[in-house]
Image (spheres, grey):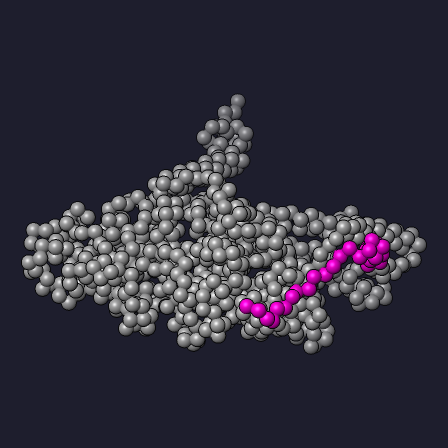
Amino acid sequence: MKSTMLTIAAAATLAAGAAAAGTLDDVKAAGKLKCGVSQGLPGFSNPDDSGAWTGLDVDMCRAVAAAVLGDAEAVEYVSLSAKDRFTALSSGEIDILSRNTTWTITRDTDLGISFAGVNYYDGQGMMVPAGLGVSSAKELDGATICTNTGTTTELNITDYFKANGMSFELVALENSNEVVAAYGAGRCDVFTTDRSGLAAERLKLADPDAHVVLPETISKEPLGPSTRAGDEQWLKIVRWTLNALIEAEEYGITAANVDEMMGSDNPSVQRILGAGDNDYGAALGLEKDWAAKAIKAVGNYGESYERNVGVNTPLKLDRGVNSLWSDGGFLYAAPIR
Amino acid sequence: MTTTNEVDHTPEERSGLAALVYDGKARSLFFQGVLAILIMVMIYLAVQNAAQNLADQGKEFGFGFFDRPSDIQILTTFGTWLVGYVPGESTIFDVLKLSVANTLILAIAGIFFATILGFLMGIMRLSSNFVVKGFATIYIEVMRNIPLLLQIFFWNAALRLIAPGPRDAGTFVPGLLQFNTKGIYGPFPITHDGFYLTMMAVIIAIGAVIAYGKYAKKVQEQTGKQSPVFLISVAILIGLPTLVFLITGRPLTIEWPNFVSEGPVLRRGFERGVGSYIAPEFMALFLALTTYTAAFIGEIVRAGIQAVPKGQSEASEALGLPGGLAMRKVILPQAFRVIIPPLTSQYLNLTKNSSLAAAIGYPELVAVFAGTILNQVGRAIEIVAVVIIVYLTISLLTSLFMNWFNNRVKLVER
């Protein structure tokens, strides 16, 4: 009879995973947002000294939690490897994947997930020990390269070497700390991942200054949050939370002055914050001041950027293409109106 | 006239519902039927549910993705060489073949050496020599009590630590293998026309040795005369192929690894594609799986030998058999029937444990097919089903072979 009980238990587990739509209701009922993050990537999603998660990707989850639940702390972080992340999202283990993940057509259409937008424009770069004396990726013929498995970097690097008629050997590892260890031990000549990732991972090396990032950027890597496919409403909540953070920077709304800005005469600001009669939250299934709560929790996009990955952080990444469109960057959020 | 209201309680007379309660056979049939139906309903619900979830995600069940080209570079290993994998040209099905080959070579090499080392340790542990016994005891207790994953990380890190830098060369096995952090390099045999004759000579030699062994046994049974079977067998096995090899004009050249010390910096070190190459990840896994499993096999062998009644060794001693011969001819054949069933389990464990390779990046079934490929194509149900079937097939074939072997060596009862 024991086997019968096991069968019933197994079937019940399978049936429980069936709920597809209605993520908003699930999150509200649970009172917390389940957010898929990395295994520790400084600046993007990384536990700090006290064990609390911080980073640009973490702020995305905090902002959504604040908009939906009114509490940025109501987030349960699930640390995922690059390999496991999509299955975790499509199977319902997490509500939102915010884990330096590149938006591609295959992932958007074939993996049962949908991308909500881009919160960091990145590109794949390569890092080599300075002692090798290599100054360009074109000189890398014959190199052994370390990277994370289950990423677009695996595909890009193969394309790049093929296009340039060069040969190479690829060591693909699941855990990013193992990649750093393999590169540090001389198993590989080159470490490749997104440029922001290189800036973060090199901090884990014994002597970060003994390594140089080559000038070539070999791919486009728009990184952004994604949600389970088939839940339009939830997708839009994440998309517009991101847009609201970017718009907030554009209109000078910060975590500090958000209450003050409620009384602003600028109609754009009023619309974002839901001041007066403006209510864009209802259509999303949220309160009218959803965006104000999100901004109050994590600040606008620029504040979050500078706090986590900006020039004053160990990553020292300048805004570059991640500036607002008005400053010559790529950040151009659809208007809240 | 005696009226009786006694009822005969024999089960045969009961029928219908009553039989379900009182007739043991009907009762068990009924409940087995109920169980079978319940299980089928559960399976149906699970399949239905999976299909519904797939439909919700806009996916369809199918293996069409097998024919898609695979665009990723994969660490060069035995499987790459066997399948002739080229990124962009090979298909995802080729990746499956490559990863299965990598799993199999690891399992076969591991099982072979773990068996030898395990038997050695098991016999050593029963030695009367204190040092030999102590060594085997310490080995077994240390190896089997440390988690395998930790041992894999240990060997991987240890190899990196002792290996010279990527543009240096060190000696791994003197005269045979050299190594650095990028891998282990050794000779590679290149065959020319006519080498098949030498291969045939090997097969003929093996046949001759088997035939000679049977003949020698027959002679011994009939006349009691013993022949030096071992020496003659070795002579045939080495002599005949060597003779053919020399007559056909030595149609084999050995390609040694080529160490480059000049030119572009990334081209320095051992030249790729010259000689044979073993990835350090393979070596780390091989060492970890072999030494770990050998500890368990050692205990199984010890238990098997100790299960043979002491009278057997006393009897062989009384007959004047020397220790080694007594072990080979009297003790081990009897110990085998105890050893083989648990030994089979260890073989299956080793095969399944090879999936821990994913942790250090050796491209076997779980790491590449259920990892990288699953991520690229997103067909979780299909891919996991294929992986399960592959492991099941390997395990069942191993069991089948070991059961056959078990039947051969088990005590024949007359």
Q: Nearer the viewer, residue B333 or A101?
A: A101
Question: For residue A193, which quarter of the picture?
Answer: bottom left
Residue name at image x 19 percent, y 57 percent: A247
- Which percent across, then down, holds residue A115? 31, 50
Residue name at image x 39 percent, y 61 percent: A217
Residue name at image x 91 percent, y 56 percent: B224
- Which percent across, then down, holds residue B110? 63, 60
Question: For residue B348, which quarter of the picture?
Answer: bottom right
Question: For residue A120, which quarter of the picture?
Answer: bottom left
Start-end of magenta stretch: B238-264
Q: Nearer the viewer, residue B213 or A312?
A: A312
Residue name at image x 24 percent, y 65 percent: A304
> Does the image show residue B213?
no
- Which percent across, then down, holds residue B329? 79, 60
Direction from residue A319 to residue A142 in the image, left or right: right
> Is residue B243 part of the magenta span, yes or no?
yes
Q: Nearer the viewer, residue A48 or A266?
A: A266
Direction from residue B158 to residue A292 in the image, left or right: left
Q: Nearer the viewer, residue B108 or A110?
A: A110
> Is residue A260 part of the magenta span, yes or no?
no
Direction from residue B80 to residue A123 in the image, left or right: left
Residue extending farthest to the top is B1
Number of numbered markers: 0
> Does the image show residue B374?
yes
- Which percent across, then down, holds residue B202? 79, 53
